[in-house]
Amino acid sequence: MKAYVCPSCGWADFHRAGLCPRCAGAVKELAFEGKGKIVTYTTIRYPPKGFENRAPYVVAIIDIENGPRVIGRVSNSPDEVKIGSAVSLSSAKEGALEFRLAA
Amino acid sequence: MTSVTSGSGRTLTDLFVEAAKQALDESGVDKIDSLYVGNMMSGFLQNQEHLGALMATALGREGVPAYKVEGACASGGVAVNAAVKAVLSGLEEIVLVGAVEKMSGYTTPEVTTGLMMAEDRLKVASTGVTFVGLNAMIAREYMSKYKVGHESLAQFPVLCHQNGLDNPKAQFRRKIEIQDVLESPLVADPLRLLDCSGIGDGAAAILLAPRDVAKKFTDSPVEVAASTVAGDTLSLYQRPTTTTFEASRQASDRAYKQAGITPRDVDLLEVHDAFSILGVMALEDLGFAEKGAGTGLLDEGECARDGRVPTNSFGGLKARGHPVGASGLYQIAEVALQLKNEAGKCQVPCAEVGLTQSVGGIGSTVAIHILRAM
């Protein structure tokens, strides 16, 4: 996965930023393996428009190894997911990251 | 303040005019120099913007300079902050601040989508997460990090429903028990229906003026001892922890300095309990408990009306109701009533200093006001 990192203050995100939001410095594009651990998560049971047919589904905040903190869906069943679970990136369509539990 | 209701058929304008006329009639003010309107979702839900001119016209104050102020769910608090600065600038003398939201009459996915507009559409809403979902992620991290059970968090909505019983304008006047919260349907795990504020319509309004002018209209004016707004990065996932709202800490630190007080001097609190977890976190971020220890205040009854720090004495967002853009102004109007000793059955004893906390988005904008009896 691609991510964007500010060399001067360490800010990082998976979405492109023209300027670092923290220090307004220039941002560099770097590549990361899409592996990480779940920081926290929820199961969405009442979805917004456009997601009505998918619920229930898991959304998590994930720390990417040596990389940025991200938010994305986790495609496994809610019962399998825990804080600290290892996940890997499975798709990044239309800017939305999707992960699955690491084997 | 109007009653907070659902499905009454009242329009955005009906609600606003009812609250604004009440403020004007009760104070005897006729001429206003400007109008500030706090609101979040009129563009999306009602296809209506330009609320400044719309409401000035509806109120029979055509041509008065008028502004819509938007800061997501903190719109009401942020509107008051903008109006306070207008009065302090000396350019405007008597300013009417109103805040209004109409959320009923739409489907749950529509309202859910509207609320998510407070987060980053491309980065966060694109995942399908909802606002309840973001708060659920906070609750999950908080409960795991501090070993706090759901039954402890559930004390917050129970307290609010208890207080709301005595507020004739509250949306939910029903006593609930901890077990009711724990057995209500899951909305976004671990948060359940009774952890969450509801969908409602309402408006509130106040008048601001320099001290000498205010005294011409009332024998019991209330001083705005502090008015602050602080920001944080827009998205929850970009913060090192979800379990503190840094903007709450910053805005309240600055407010205590402005007012020249410490949390110990605060006699009553109105906090932004859109979700049970946010009520508990507010007690910590505002300096009333150590991190992870907020529920201890509830265990000991300290947040009840007869406790050391009466909190959400009119029912809070949970029971009075949370018409999102208006809630910040309901809080300020309710604290003003307490300080004037006009809170009826919701009255807390001997209140001289009150603090309100209004949170926009997922803690990305926080408005704090400290009011003092004069």
Image (cartoon, coloured by chain):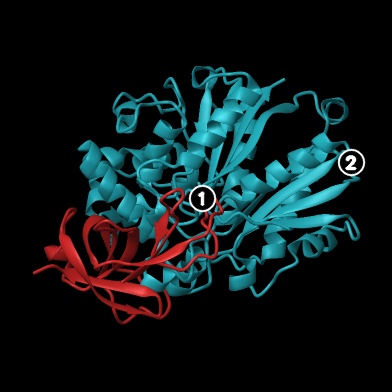
Chain colours: A red, B cyan
Check disc 2 and report its element: helix, strand or loop: loop
Reading the image, the residue beneath label 1 is: A22
Could you tell me if residue B153 is visible in this image?
A: yes
Badge 2, how many Cα within 10 Å: few under 14, some, many 20+?
few
Front residue of this view, candidates B373 and B350 = B373
Residue at horizontal 19 percent and vertical 53 percent from the top: A83
Q: Is residue A95 above or below residue B28?
A: below
State which chain disc 1 sits on.
Answer: A
Residue at horizontal 53 percent and vertical 71 percent from the top: B105
Q: Quadrant of the C terminus of chain B?
A: top right
Q: Which of the 4 image quarters holds residue B296?
A: top left
Check disc 1 and report its element: helix, strand or loop: loop
Residue B137 placement (x, y as % from top left)? 31, 54
Q: Residue furthest left?
A: A103
Q: Report the number of discs.
A: 2
Reading the image, the residue beneath label 2 is: B91
Residue at horizontal 45 percent and vertical 68 percent from the top: B112
